[in-house]
Amino acid sequence: MDDVHQPLPEQRTTLTRRTLTEWATLARLGGPILIAQIAQMANGVIDTVMAGHASAEDLAAVGIGSSLWMPLFLFFMGVLGALQPIISGDNGARAFHRIMPATWQGLYIAAASAVIMIALLVNVQPVLDHLELDRHTAGITQGYLNAFAWGVPALLLMTALRGLTDGLGHTRVIMVFSVLSTLINLPMNYILIYGKLGFPALGGVGCGWATAISNGVAALAMLVYLNRSAAYRRFHLIQDWSAPHRSQLAAILRVGLPIGFTIFVEASMFSVIALFLAPLGPVVVAGHQIALNVVSLLFMLPLSLGMALTLRVAFLTGAGAPDTARLISRSSLILAVAIAGVFALLLYGFSPEIARLYSGEADVQAVTVRLLAFAALFQIADVVQVTCISALRGYKDTRLPMFIMLFSFWGVGLPLGYVLTFTDAIRPAMGAAGFWLGLTGGLATASLLLGWRLFCYRSSASERAPAIG
């Protein structure tokens, strides 16, 4: 076992030292995850900027196409996200014989997910008709998605293989290949969007091909690495092939489907809010999008730490160290609140400067500054909830958290936001700020309920395996 990336806990030491040691382990696991997340986000920024320089229609088409494939991918990514805690737990338990069978079941799920996702993406014309797009933009959107679909198998293959590498504590692997994908995507966009090196100018459709090619090359390179690296000789994909196994597939789906639905619910809620705000005018929508973009960027750090926390809790539970698992899952809340507090101060104290970075229009800046004040509160609640739910995923406890998030977002956050935004039922209508306050209320509810679940949770005996050697 790799004792560098996922060391066994120190038992004979002070509580403070144990806590700091565990936080250091989280940093080692989470740092590469953060870079991978930023690289993946950079791909979206590159696509948007470069498509925008082609034409407004190409920019709109890529934006609409991205809004269609992203929720689907996030759902399947969540389903495959079950592999991380499962394999990390097996790693902690020294149950190495279970790791490759679990990986292969994940690959089968990824293959089935790719078929479903491709079938949906190449048949979105009814959706485009419902959006009443002009024929030219609709054609670019469908062309972009048709091209993007060729890279879907590679994208989901990398997501499944990430379960193996992250589960073993090797979070730098996905970091390297995510950065590689970004480095390929940039020149391919330039060549295919604008028609360089003898290629025709494909506009937004070229953006889809560039993404597909970059995903394909990165996935192929990752496969080669895993089959040739000395670190993975014990876990050889080809030699350790495993046939589909119904109970193993069911175990992954039992953990993964709630994660997928939870992520999809959150993503869809933000899409619904954007639609609700549209009647308030472009200035309000622009300010809202800026505030959301800023919060999303800051969220990458706590999200990455949360993903590392999932791996660590699963490993410790598998290694038969439930006390240390409880220590890191609870003490991480202190770390999360500290991070959230710093971010909240930055959002509140530097909101005018942040607004000016995004827009030169005074009206948009004014809306952005006002929303960032509410985003500061939102940030605190969001960081706490992601820390709690990440720890619970490490325990493979995903079903009840899914219902908690569904209730918090759709039962509290969205209705409260709508009432505060458009009605005088509680106070005079607040406009877009009402949704931010409603979201904060929903996330605060999620934080309290998930925190209660986390502090009351006790892993079953079947989840605790004694350490060997």
Image: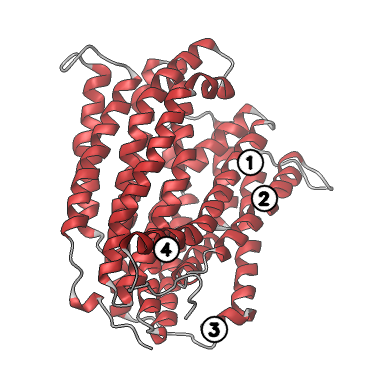
Residue that carries the numbered disc 4 in the rendered image = 21
Q: Amino acid at mark 3?
A: His
Residue that carries the numbered disc 3 in the rendered image = 236
Q: Secondary structure at mark 4?
A: helix
Pointer 2 local density, CA inside 10 Å: few below 14, some 14–19, many at least 20: many
Q: Secondary structure at mark 2?
A: helix
Residue that carries the numbered disc 2 in the rendered image = 185
Distance from Cα at disc 2 to Cα at disc 3: 29 Å
State left or right for residue 328 relative to residue 235: left
Distance from Cα at disc 2 to Cα at disc 4: 38 Å
Distance from Cα at disc 4 to Cα at disc 1: 38 Å
Image coordinates for residue 258, horizontal then vertical, percent: 28, 58
Q: Earlier in the sequence, mark 2 or mark 4?
A: 4
Whether residue 120 is visible to the viewer of this picture, yes or no, is yes
Q: Earlier in the sequence, mark 4 or mark 3?
A: 4
Q: Secondary structure at mark 1?
A: helix
Q: Earlier in the sequence, mark 2 or mark 3?
A: 2
